[in-house]
Amino acid sequence: MSFASKALDQHLIIAISAALALAGCAKKKEEPVAEAPAAAPAAAAPDTTLEGQVDIVAWPGYIERGETDKNYDWVTPFEQDTGCKVNIKTAGTSDEMVSLMTQGGYDLVTASGDASLRLIRGGTVQPIDLARVPSFANVDERLKQGAWHFVDGKNYGTPYQWGPNVLMYNTKAFPTAPKSWSVVFEEQKLGDGKSNKGRLQAYDGPIYIADAALYLMAKKPELGIKDPYELNEEQYAAVLGLLRQQHPLVHRYWHDANVAVQDFTNEGVVVSGSWPFQVNTLVANQQPIASVVPDEGATGWADTTMLAANAKHPNCAYKWMEWSLNAKVQGDVAAWFGSVPAVPAACKGNALLTDTGCATNGFDNFDKIHFWRTPEAACSTGTCVPYSRWATDYVAVMGGR
């Protein structure tokens, strides 16, 4: 082969190699880029179809449909507006509320602080979706993160009403308002010259131990009680001693508000720790009744509408929670029960409550009230007597043991 032929062959080989290289590059450039994985489908929107009913456990007088007084009806308008029928089961004590909610079959409960923590710890109620209760924004700032419903950064309900446990008295037996809870804890002659023995009531619920503890905070400061819901063994023993001393004086341990009212009307009872509801009822019936918060202060309640963990009618329940924070509803409830609304806007412009009603019911006494809450073993002072002991021992006290 000639030199020229060899050169030609070499040039040909180089040209072919270059062409193949270029083709390879072109092929690489033409390869499609791998596509990103398809996005997961969006979660389906929750079903907000209204179920047609809502079942509520509530304190007596908390949910009215005008059967006692047609002016007090915040159920009928709700039912007409939503189509959700409201079924009400009243409970006389927090223990009864916890029992009913644990058994199941109810969507909501208006729980006081001595029930709410038990319901939360037991998984009986669930955190609420505040986006579904826009009127929560109107709630009193003092209540939005109350320790009885705000746990681990979550709201387990919407505030409903609050107020003190007042000292209710018959003005004929007390021409001058009593200044101390001693009139229900210690035997003494009253303003009418008669003994209080057999003429007073005490509450039929273990949380009443806190009322006795509150009295001893002032009566016996040497006990060192700082919080009526946090009692060490020594303090607890002293409180039980006071309650046993009280037992012979008690006409009735009450939990039914209507029975408590009848005792004042027909049974000669003249003094008792009471909800404002009984006071309002007796005054409306022209009975010689008044109430006071004594010098030692008072226990009280800040009640929360809580949603059951297994609620069968959650959408109607959310509608009720939103409805219950309506300023008109809040004012009407406060006027009927003698409580303070959870929504301050309710304090003005309500014909039933009037513009002075909130002040009368204690709006400015918030810091003077020791609100009910569940006593727990782990407390700020170390170890305290838990509620389970309170429950067992108070049954014994009421039985005279």
Image: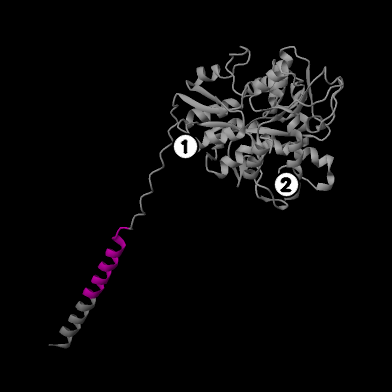
User: Would residue 93 appear left or right of 283 to someone viewing this image?
Assistant: left
Mark 1 and mark 2: span between their CA atoms? 34 Å
Quadrant where the image shows the C terminus: top right
- Dot 2 falls on a residue whose secondary structure is loop
**Disc 1 packing (10 Å; few <14; some 14–19; many ≥20):** some
* Percent coordinates x, y for residue 311 in the rendering: 48, 34
Q: Which mark is residue 231?
A: 2
Q: Which span is picked out in magenta?
A: 15-32
Residue on which the image places disc 1: 310
Eyeballing the image, is 286 above or below 318?
Answer: above
Q: Amino acid at mark 1?
A: Asn
Quadrant where the image shows the N terminus: bottom left
The first of marks 1 and 2 along the sequence is 2
Would you say the residues marked 1 and 2 are in contact, meaning their CB atoms lie under 8 Å apart? no
Eyeballing the image, is 286 above or below 176?
Answer: above
Residue at 23% x, 71% y is 20
* Percent coordinates x, y for residue 8 in the rendering: 18, 81
Q: Amino acid at mark 2?
A: Leu
Eyeballing the image, is 144 above or below 382?
Answer: above
The answer to whether residue 349 is seen in the rendering is no
Q: Which mark's residue is nearer the viewer, 1 or 2?
A: 2
- Dot 1 falls on a residue whose secondary structure is loop
Frontmost residue, 106 versus 221: 221
**Disc 2 packing (10 Å; few <14; some 14–19; many ≥20):** many
